[in-house]
Image: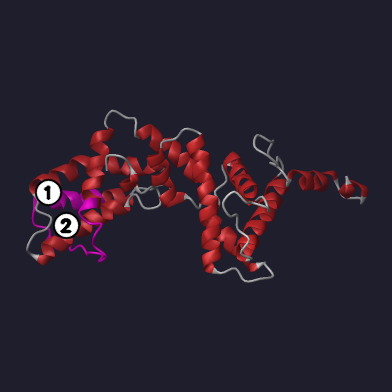
């Protein structure tokens, strides 16, 4: 009303009104892009600024309604299915503050928003382990995370899930204790099964994939499963020869990396 009285256009007045939305659970969401953008900027400014000032919610106390602000950010991004990096957004918000936001403060702020996203997904009835697996990789992108949780939940109900997850788990469990990244020397692959695995791995890595997409990951991983199983049945990964061992561990590390940015499957039941 004040904007219209001051001579602003209707679109500006509507954006000012919409940037407050949603005001409470179940409230309507902004329709205009201006309302979306200003609302996101306002909430992220409040979140980054109050965490930087040491005024984060404490227990049941939330005098600045930051939980509501975080839920507002999440609801708008999810409703719009908008790709959005919360980590980068908080950093940009921090750069505009009149006080310093330490890396720890921004990390705590991000974790706070991610915690609200986890609560939102659990309230919708998704499995705890599926939510945890996806958020470990995609909490920074709420809309993408919600889509990935839905997709992974469907995969976990498939009849062949008990043959899919174990094949990936075999590759991760044997390599996850190593900090070193092992180099692969294709000319020194000696067993037919490891040569087959390397060829299948290279083919999988060449496939175009949508970042963070569960379906894209499984599209390239499923053809690897019989090859992985034959490899483990025929080849001793931890060979005494360091070159053979390095080659085999390197291939398994790269298979494990196929899920990077999608989900941490080690958090799933049955891994």
Report the residue at 32% width, 30% height from top.
Answer: 158
Report the residue at 48% width, 38% height from top.
Answer: 122
Q: Nearer the viewer, mark 2 or mark 1?
A: 2
Q: Is residue 14 above or below residue 188?
A: above
The image quadrant of residue 48 is bottom right
Q: Are marks 2 and 1 in contact (CB under 8 Å)?
A: no
Give the class, few, some or many, for how many residues have Cα within 10 Å of label 1's Cα (few <14, many ≥20): some
Is 187 covered by the magenta stretch? yes
The image quadrant of residue 88 is bottom right
Which mark, by number, is residue 61? none
Q: Nearer the viewer, residue 227 or 175?
A: 175
Report the residue at 6% width, 63% height from top.
Answer: 240
Q: What colour scheme was applied to this rendering of the protein?
A: secondary structure
Q: Nearer the viewer, residue 31 or 29?
A: 29
Q: Is residue 189 above or below residue 82?
A: below
Image location of residue 193, percent across then percent down: 12, 48
Q: Nearer the viewer, residue 253 or 127?
A: 127
Q: Is residue 210 visible?
A: no
Indicate the quadrant containing the C terminus: top left, top right, bottom left or bottom right: top left
Secondary structure at badge 1 equals helix
Indicate the quadrant containing the N terminus: top left, top right, bottom left or bottom right: top right
Give the class, few, some or many, for how many residues have Cα within 10 Å of label 2's Cα (few <14, many ≥20): many
- 220 relative to 247 in the view: left or right: right
Q: Earlier in the sequence, mark 2 or mark 1?
A: 1
Q: Is residue 163 visible?
A: yes
- Return the residue at label 1: 193
- 5 relative to 207 in the view: left or right: right
- Return the residue at label 2: 248
Image location of residue 80, percent across then percent down: 60, 41
Q: Which residues are magenta?
A: 173-201
- Report, in whole angstroms, how far the alpha carbon at label 2 lies from the one at label 1: 11 Å
């Amino acid at each position: 009303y004040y904007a219209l009285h001051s001579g602003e256009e209707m679109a500006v007045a509507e954006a000012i009104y919409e940037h407050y939305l949603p005001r409470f659970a179940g409230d309507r969401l902004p329709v205009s892009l201006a309302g979306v953008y200003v609302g996101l900027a306002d909430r992220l400014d409040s979140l980054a600024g109050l965490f930087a000032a040491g005024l984060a919610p404490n227990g049941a106390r939330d005098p600045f309604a930051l939980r509501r602000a975080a839920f507002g950010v999440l609801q708008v991004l999810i409703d719009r299915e908008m790709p959005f990096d919360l980590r980068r957004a908080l950093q940009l918000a921090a750069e505009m503050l009149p006080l310093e936001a330490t890396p720890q403060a921004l990390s705590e702020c991000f974790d706070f928003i991610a915690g609200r996203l986890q609560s939102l997904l659990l309230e919708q009835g998704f499995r705890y382990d599926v939510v945890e697996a996806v958020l470990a990789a995609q909490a920074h992108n709420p809309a993408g995370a919600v889509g990935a949780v839905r997709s992974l939940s469907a995969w976990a109900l498939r009849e062949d899930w008990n043959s899919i997850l174990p094949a990936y788990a075999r590759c991760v469990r044997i390599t996850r204790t190593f900090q070193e990244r092992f180099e692969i020397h294709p000319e020194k692959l000696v067993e037919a099964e490891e040569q087959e695995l390397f060829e299948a791995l290279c083919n999988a890595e060449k496939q175009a994939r949508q970042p963070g997409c569960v379906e894209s990951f499984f599209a390239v991983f499923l053809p690897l499963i019989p090859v992985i199983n034959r490899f483990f049945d025929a080849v001793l990964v931890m060979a005494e020869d360091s070159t053979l061992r390095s080659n085999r561990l390197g291939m398994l590390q790269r298979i494990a990396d196929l899920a990077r940015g999608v989900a941490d499957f080690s958090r799933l039941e049955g891994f």
